[in-house]
Image (tube, rainbow, N blue to C red):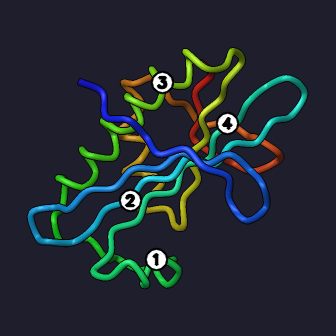
Amino acid sequence: MINIFREYLDKDGDVVYDDETILPSKQTIRIVFYEVEHNNRYYYDIYVVTMHKKKAIDSTILKTTGKDGVAGLLWAKNKIKEFEILIKEIHENVTICIYWDDNRRRNIYEWGLRKEGYKMGRIFDKKCLCKKI
């Protein structure tokens, strides 16, 4: 069964979808999909963070914070699949974009999502892993 994402407007008035859960290590993992509409196409940037305390969400760039190894990555991969199903029901002309902080993350994301149809590309003049839905 597909989990329902929380939908809300962020402080800039942009549409955001998110979900989170507690991993076996008692850390919280959160995935956020940020919506950008441009030329009749919807783009969704993904942000995934694993943290000990929710207030630490802003201090995770270029840090390894997850203690659950593959469990967090598999959870995020399943959430991306669920989001693809959800967003197809809401919009046409959708592209999901995944950016990274470093090459290690890029390689892991590419390895984990290439079978799902994600390919390297450039969106808004920035290199990313993307999939048109």
Given contact means CB atoms under 8 Å apart, are the residues at marks 1 and 2 in contact?
A: yes
Instruction: Say which element carries label 3.
Output: helix
**Of callouts 1 and 4, the N-terminal one:** 1
Crowd around label 2: few <14 · some 14–19 · many ≥20 (10 Å): many
Instruction: Say which element carries label 4.
Output: strand
The numbered disc on residue 121 is 4
**Of callouts 1 and 2, the N-terminal one:** 2
Name the residue located 26 percent from the left edge and 71 percent from the top edge: 66
- Marks 4 and 3, Cα distance to the nearest angstrom? 23 Å
- Marks 1 and 2, Cα distance to the nearest angstrom? 9 Å
Q: Position of residue 46 (x, y in %)?
A: 54, 49
**Of callouts 4 and 2, the N-terminal one:** 2
Residue holding disc 3: 86
Residue type at mark 1 is Ile
Name which quarter of the figure residue 133 lies in. top right
Crowd around label 3: few <14 · some 14–19 · many ≥20 (10 Å): some
Residue holding disc 1: 57
- Marks 3 and 2, Cα distance to the nearest angstrom? 17 Å
Residue type at mark 4 is Gly
Name the residue located 24 percent from the left edge and 55 percent from the top edge: 72
The numbered disc on residue 2 is none
Residue holding disc 2: 30
Locate the N terminus by quadrant: top left
Whether residue 36 is situated above or below residue 25 in the rendered picture: above
Comparing labels 4 and 2, the label whose residue is closer to the camera: 2
Q: Position of residue 132 (x, y in %)?
A: 62, 22
